[in-house]
Amino acid sequence: MEITIKLLAVAILIVLTAFFVASEFAIVKVRKTRMEARAAEGDKKAEKSLKLLNNLDYYLSACQLGITITALGLGWLGEPTLEVLLHPVFDELALPPTVTGTISFAIAFFTITFLHVVLGELAPKTIAIQKAEAITLLLCRPLILYSKLMYPLIWLLNGAANIFVRMFGFQTARESDEVHSEDELRHILTQSYKQGEINRSEYQYVDRIFEFDNRTAKEIMIPRTEMAVLDIQDSVTSSIRSMKSKRYTRYPVIEGDKDKVMGLIHMKELVFMDDQDSLRPYIRPIMKVFENVPIHDLLVKMKKEHSHMAVLLDEYGGTSGIVTVEDILEEIVGEIRDEFDHEEEREIRRLKNGHFLLEGKTSIQDINEYFRVDLNHDDIDTISGWIYTQDYDASEGTIIQGGRLEFKIVDMEKGQIKKVEVWEKSP
């Protein structure tokens, strides 16, 4: 009868070990935001779970104390109990008492250790990691009850540990905030995408957000050479003809030169121009900013001033290019194509032979991301600029190597690289 009670006590200690191990790993692994969402929906168990997560240092100490107590209990009770059971078996073999004691102790020690490690620790840990939310909700109430009963001892041991930790200049678990770096968040995002928790569009949107703050207006601008403008000196008829042919919504208005931008005019103003001999009455103010302004700051400024277009100025005060709200939003949501954009060519197009055709204005950053290469672009922004840094005499037909890629100029116009063909080098 006594042996039966002791064996039952050993089983209970293993179950308690499993309880504390599962609780410890579950409350560390579970997502706090998920519990907050469930609590907001009225889930009482989630509210209890938040109590654990908001005081993680204390409850982890409670789990550690529980694991230590049960381990000591198993060592004190389990091995002697099994030894008593094994002695009669070895006595039947007529072995010397010393040999019998040694073998029975070894078998009892291995058996208790095996049960403690496998059933009490490894199995509960694996289950808790995979089912962290369910385990936390299931065990939160008994863990809170146990912590209240053992509060004096937990407070004493945890306080002593915190004093020791501070002596070496470290923060306690309560004092340190759990934060993630950008690289860690990207890794979490990638793993969530691979596991099917988020779809490809969601993954791409969030990934572009990280790149958003790293880019400047100069990198996404419509360059000066490609700006569609109206000249205040041209006739209204000529200006309307130009607006109809190019089909943009807004046009910068210049005074003889693109360095002298007076403002902008909206396409809808066409309906008011029938009896006018000048664009001047319809010109609206246009924002002017330095070309290296971060696009995040530029978007905030454009929203504040209700502006849809900004002129970018270089370090000498000349016009470098223009940026629209659409250009900025495309950095987050990808390319936005309207009913007229079918006439525009994509910056990176796949050819039938497996090669790719690039627009000369394609940014180096986009190429690096698309082809998974690392072209150095500290001082330039576009592939045409990069090619000239590699060969300042580059002409149509010139081939430049960059990492595992080869770039060939296929179209030039007045010294400006318009099209570039790219392919992977043969092994």
Image (spheres, rainbow, N blue to C red):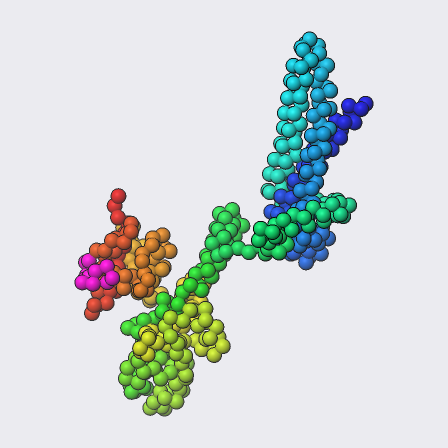
Task: Tell which residue pokes out farthest to the top in this image.
Answer: 94
Q: Main secondary structure of the magenta part?
A: loop
Question: What segment carries the magenta color?
Answer: 388-398
| Quarter occupied by residue 79 | top right
Seen in the image, is 73 located left or right of residue 397? right
Res. 264 visible in picture: yes
Q: Residue at x 71, y 16 (%)?
A: 87
293 or 41: which is nearer to us? 293
231 or 137: which is nearer to us? 137
Q: Residue at x 35, y 87 (%)?
A: 279
Instruction: Please tell me whether residue 392 belongs to the stretch shown in magenta.
Output: yes
Res. 137 visible in picture: no
Instruction: Please tell me whether residue 399 belongs to the stretch shown in magenta.
Output: no
Q: List x then y, in percent, for residue 171.
A: 60, 54
Q: Is residue 357 above or below residue 404?
A: below
268 or 388: which is nearer to us? 388
Q: Residue at x 67, y 48 (%)?
A: 160
Seen in the image, is 227 located left or right of residue 300? left
Q: List x then y, in percent, for residue 275.
A: 36, 91
Image quadrant occupied by the N terminus: top right
383 or 243: which is nearer to us? 383
